[in-house]
Structure formats: C-alpha cells, structure tokens
Image (spheres, coloured by chain):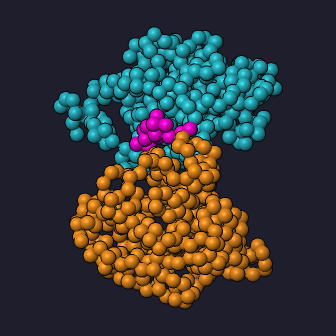
Chain colours: A orange, B cyan
Amino acid sequence: MKCRKCDAKAIINMRQHKLALCKDHYPQWMLEQTQRFIEKYRMFSLQERVLVAVSGGKDSLSLWDILWQLGYQADGLYIGLGIDGGIGYSDESHHLAEKFAAGRGLRLRVVDVLETYGETIPEMAERTTRGKGRPCAVCGLTKRHVMNRVARDEGYDVLVTGHNLDDEAAVLFANTLNWAPGYLMRQGPVLEARQGMARKAKPLCRFYEREMVAYALVRGIEYIYDECPHALGSKTIYYKEILNKLESDRPGAKLSFYLSFLKAKEDGLFTRPQQGDGETGASGEALHTCPTCGQPTSAPGECAFCRLAIRIS
Amino acid sequence: MKCRKCDAKAIINMRQHKLALCKDHYPQWMLEQTQRFIEKYRMFSLQERVLVAVSGGKDSLSLWDILWQLGYQADGLYIGLGIDGGIGYSDESHHLAEKFAAGRGLRLRVVDVLETYGETIPEMAERTTRGKGRPCAVCGLTKRHVMNRVARDEGYDVLVTGHNLDDEAAVLFANTLNWAPGYLMRQGPVLEARQGMARKAKPLCRFYEREMVAYALVRGIEYIYDECPHALGSKTIYYKEILNKLESDRPGAKLSFYLSFLKAKEDGLFTRPQQGDGETGASGEALHTCPTCGQPTSAPGECAFCRLAIRIS
C-alpha cells in the first residue's frame, strides 16, 4: 500500500480514516492532528507552561515529543513508584524518561514516592484496604496527588497526560456499564482548573493505541514495552478486549463511541451546566479543601491521600 | 440444588439474585415480581384495559399468561406479517397464539398485514430502500403503526410488549455505543401516552431471557422456538452476544447495566424534563400529526408508514 501523500510505501493504514501514510508523512500528520485537537478543545496555548506526566511508556514519551516539536513549553514529570515486578519496572521507566529528556535538552522533574513519603506504592498498598492485593487504587491516588501538587507549586498552567483513545474508550465503557453520573459528566479531553488544581488535558485522546505505537517506532523513541506488572487482569484491560472485538467487527467503532459521547455532551445530553463549550467542564459538584495538602476533596476533612500518607510521616 | 422456599428440587438458579426455586415456587415468584414491577413503574391498574402484543414467542405468551393470572383485563393482538422463511413462521406463530388464547378463554385480536394493506412484510420491504435486503425496519414500522392504531381505535389504556432484560439491555447498549440522545432519554419500562397514542409498558424488562424460557417451560406454554428467520445476523443479536460475554464473566452485569441506567435517569442525569417520576416520560420532542392516520410523526406531512402503505391502496 502506498502513502496517500507521496509514492513511498505506507507504514500504517488507518481504516477508520481511510488513510495510509509513509514514515515521513505519518509523524507529520500526527503533529498536525494533535495541534488541531489542542485548538479544538482549547487545551493550552504556546504561551502557557505545560507539565507532561511521563511514565516512560510509548504514549507519554510520544506526547512529550509531539509537544516539543510543536514548540510548546513542556516540562516532564516522572513519578518514581518503586514498582519492580521482577522486571525492574520503575527503574527502567525512569532511565528511559531521563534518556529521552537528555537527548532533547528537555527538563524532567522527578518525584520519588519512597524518598518523599517513606514507602513505595506496593508497600503503601499493603497497609490499606484500598489495596486488596492490587496497588492500582493507591497508585492512582498517589499519582493524582503528586501531579496536582507539582503543577500547583511550580506554577504550571496545565497538566497533560498521554491517555489515548483506547484508554478513554475503556474508561467511558466502564462508566457507562454502571452509569456513573459524576464520571460521565466529567470525562472529556479537558478538565478545567478548579480550586487550586491546574487544568488537565489529554491531547492524544483521539489516537488509537496502535497509532501511538506506530508513532513511537517511526520516531525511534525508546520506551518501556512492558505494561505495569500490576495491571495484568485489570478491568480496564478486560474492557479494552471487548472494545477491540467491537472495533475489529466494525473499524472506527471506538472512535465513534468516544466522539458521539463528546457530541451528545456538547449538545447538552447531561443535566449539569458545563463550563466553556460543554466538552471541557468540571462536574460542578461541591468540593471541600483538604486542610493538610490544600487539594480539593469530595468530603470535609483530610483527603484520601493525606489520610493514607499521614500515617507514614 | 434445593428450592429456597421448600425442600423440592430447584429448576432454576438465578445467580444475580442468589435465588434457586422449584417448579411451583418459580412461577409464583415470577407473578409476584411482575406485579411489583407493574406497581413500581406505574404501568397500569386492574381497572385499565390492557392490549398485549402477542408474537407467538415465549416472552409475549408468558407475559399474557402472567397478566391473566394476576387478574388484569388483558386482550391479545396478533399481527400476521406474512413471513414464511421456509418454516411457515407466521402461520405457526398465529396457530400457537390462537391455541393459547382458546385454552384460557382469552380474546385475541388479529390484524393480517396482507389482508389489510395488500402486501406481506417481505413484499413491502422489497419495494423500499428502507428494506435493503432485510425487512426488519419495515416490519418494526408496520407493527408500531398497527399496535398504536388498534390500541387507540379500540380504546385500550395501555399497550404492553414482552421485551425482556436481554432485549432492553441490547437496545440500551446500541443506543449507548452511538450516544443517541433521543433514544436514551426515551428508553424505559414505561412510555407515557402522547398525542393519541396509548401508554406503552414492558412488564418483563427486568427478567433475563433464560428466566422467560424457564417460565414458559414450567408453565407448559407452547411457543414458537425459532427466531424470526430475518433476525439472523442482526445487530441486536450481535450486541446480545457481547452482553452475554459480560454476563458470563460477571453474573448480574446486564441487570446492573439496565438498572443503573434507569437510576441515573431518575436521578436526573439527562437534561430534558421527564414526566412523572423520571423513568416514565416521553422524550418531549415536538411531534406532528400524520394527516392520513392521525398518529404522531417526527416531521410534518404523512408519517413513514403511510408514505410506505399509501402506494399499495
């Protein structure tokens, strides 16, 4: 198959877009598309300071690479979780993130959970019922807390993550299967700033996972191939498999599921008033402020992270 | 496994309810549950006249059987569609519906599409682009028209159909995959009367298909085993397979999907004001009246059925 834009051999064929591109035109197309999504969903401007949450995986490193090429002021944030899993998962991720940043002269901030809070994520998880043999809930809680803290303390305008379409569709699928109103109303490419938390944005939310893999490969980005060892058997992976079946029976199904959701939301399907253009609003629920860390929390008193971490220090 | 209510052998185990019942207690439980749903969703009262859409399948005949035992004034409506499919589908369905009614001294109204409109459903479908080799769209359109007409002309208060949980979950799944706002806002156990159309209700909407099969078997109801030959390969069957996978991995998944949707709707997830208790409202969109048949239609001028049928007469 040939590239739509030149005669070279195509390296990817995107059936849902009826578009095949070569190794030169594909990364260029990814840049153009990302720029278009950043503008369409009013994510951030060239004047704003952007903090990219970097895990060492293909999505976050590719996102940082794209933003860097597009000329955004994007620093990275790596959070050392202390996960080994027999494959040195966190060490390898950290190494790859540092190497990526050094190769491009980019600034990588690092927060090590063990150094900062006295325990690794698996250790924290063992102490709490939240864990139940799986540290994912504690890990998510901790990452959100640290990302929000660094973005606020260091004065970033926006915190961006590398969630791709497969991630977003799986979360939407989960929230739809149990019709979780708060999550449905909040999900979108942008979550506006609120109560001292930076705006959050997901510039890759319309790219399929396979498109991200192709981008990382063609750009020669070295990333950690392994999934986090704790993610095995997770619900998200289960929902991704179901969506993969839908996608293979009808190419474009995932994209259509996600985009029709955003469209319905923008057209006012859901009750609560949304800020901005309707796709970008926070859920509007009443929030409290944690007296210890100052971050928003859904109930009065300390937030879940401080209740967890306070026992350490 | 033993019956929860006596020592007899259980004929069904409903994992999502953690409930096993014997051949005597199971049909009794089905009656109690149906009565509970009729009241909960305010479907109809003992004083109202009920028209049951009867296809000759397990769901509609079992529904009629249940309503008859509960003492409701329920007449049947059989629509002869003229579908053969090499198995005499319509003839056999009609025969079984008549036999069921005669055995209980119930009144069955019959509308034959060929006699009334000059063509069978497959013939109508061949004439129109709606068909596209599959008469299901024309069939649905015609059945809705005939059911509404009979309910209105004969003064029934409510039209009930035998849609079970598997049917409702599959429709909800389809409407969620493409986030169809109008359909999402309208789906529920009851659709209130509007513009000369009778109220519609689905008393079986919380029973799994396998529960309906068990009911029909234990009650000795003779029904047509075959699916409509035209339904093979339909989207609804495809979505049912996906939901069956979800259900087998997590018993109760279908029920939870449907009930959490109703709950979210009742709690006001969706924008448009709902009538009644929020589960029962029509979608509230502006409707027009068909100048030929007097039924509501979404656009000015003749309704889709009259545009189709007028060419015959």
Query: Can residue A306 be seen at all in this image of the molecule?
Result: yes
The magenta stretch spans which residues? B256-271
Task: State whether the magenta stretch is mostly helix, strand or loop.
Answer: helix
Query: Can residue A260 be seen at all in this image of the molecule?
Result: no
Instruction: Reply yes or no: does residue B71 show up in magenta.
Output: no
Query: Which residue appears at 63% of the width and 61% of the height?
Result: A42
- Along the viewing direction, whichever of B184 and B167 lies nearer the viewer: B184
- Along the viewing direction, whichever of A169 and B233 lies nearer the viewer: A169
Query: Which residue appears at 61% of the width and 79% of the height?
Result: A68
Rendered view: A302 above or below A93: above
* Figure quadrant of the C terminus of chain B: top right
Rendered view: B234 above or below A57: above
- Along the viewing direction, whichever of B264 and A104 lies nearer the viewer: A104
Q: Find residue B85 and report its horizontal and vertical position in percent.
A: 63, 36
Give left or right: position of B210 versus A130. Answer: right
Q: Find residue A292 and report its horizontal and vertical position in percent.
A: 32, 63
Q: Find residue A238 and report its horizontal and vertical position in percent.
A: 43, 60
* Figure quadrant of the N terminus of chain B: top left
Q: Find residue A86 and report its horizontal and vertical position in percent.
A: 32, 80
Give left or right: position of A224 versus A313. Answer: right
Query: Which residue appears at 76% of the width and 39% of the height?
Result: B129
Query: Which residue appears at 26% of the width and 66% of the height?
Result: A310
